[in-house]
Image (cartoon, rainbow, N blue to C red):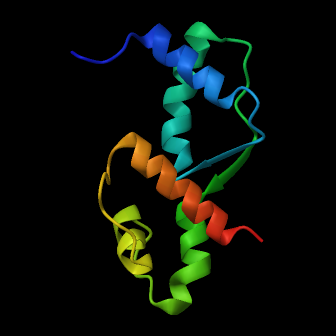
């Protein structure tokens, strides 16, 4: 009801990812399906980045040996001692995925 129009959202997403080489996310296939469908309507020639990094898998690989019990973002936040402020909002979840990705980069 209070969401921005689809066309505006598509433009904002396009601007954010048009030059991206890698798609990083927590269960990224879920989000990619929605973005692909949206772009089919507004940016039909655009192709999403082919390289995909799932931060769930990164977290398991990096922290299972230190006792990580689940790949949920809340479990990862708790395991790493991160704040839950803003958790489950698009902005904070993106920031936390980015932070996790940066921690796990080689």
Where does residue 75 sit, x and y in percent of width and height? 36, 72
Q: Nearer the viewer, residue 51 or 99?
A: 99
Residue 10: x and y, percent? 53, 16
**Image position of 84 with respect to 25: above or below:** below
Residue plotted at (24% across, 17% down): 2
Residue at left 43%, top 50%?
93
Where, by quadrant of the figure, is residue 14 drawn? top right
Identified at 67% across, 11% down, the residue is: 44
- Quadrant where the C terminus lies? bottom right
57, above or below 43, in the image: below
- 90 relative position to 64: left or right: left
| Residue drawn 56% across the image and 61% down it | 99
Name the quarter where the N terminus is drawn. top left
Q: Find residue 56 and report its horizontal and vertical position in percent.
A: 52, 64
The quadrant where residue 98 appears: bottom right
Q: Is residue 2 above or below residue 77?
A: above
On the image, the x and y values in percent for residue 50 come to 76, 40
């Amino acid at each position: 009801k209070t969401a921005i129009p689809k066309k505006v959202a598509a433009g904002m997403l396009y601007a954010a990812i048009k030059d991206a080489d890698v798609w990083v996310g927590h269960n990224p296939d879920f989000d990619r399906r929605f973005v692909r469908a949206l772009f089919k309507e507004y940016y039909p020639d655009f192709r999403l980045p082919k390289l995909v990094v799932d931060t769930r898998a990164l977290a398991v690989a990096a922290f299972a040996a230190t006792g990580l019990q689940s790949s949920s973002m809340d479990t990862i936040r708790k395991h790493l001692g991160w704040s839950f402020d803003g958790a489950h909002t698009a902005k904070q979840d993106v920031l936390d995925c980015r932070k996790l990705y940066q921690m796990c980069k080689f």
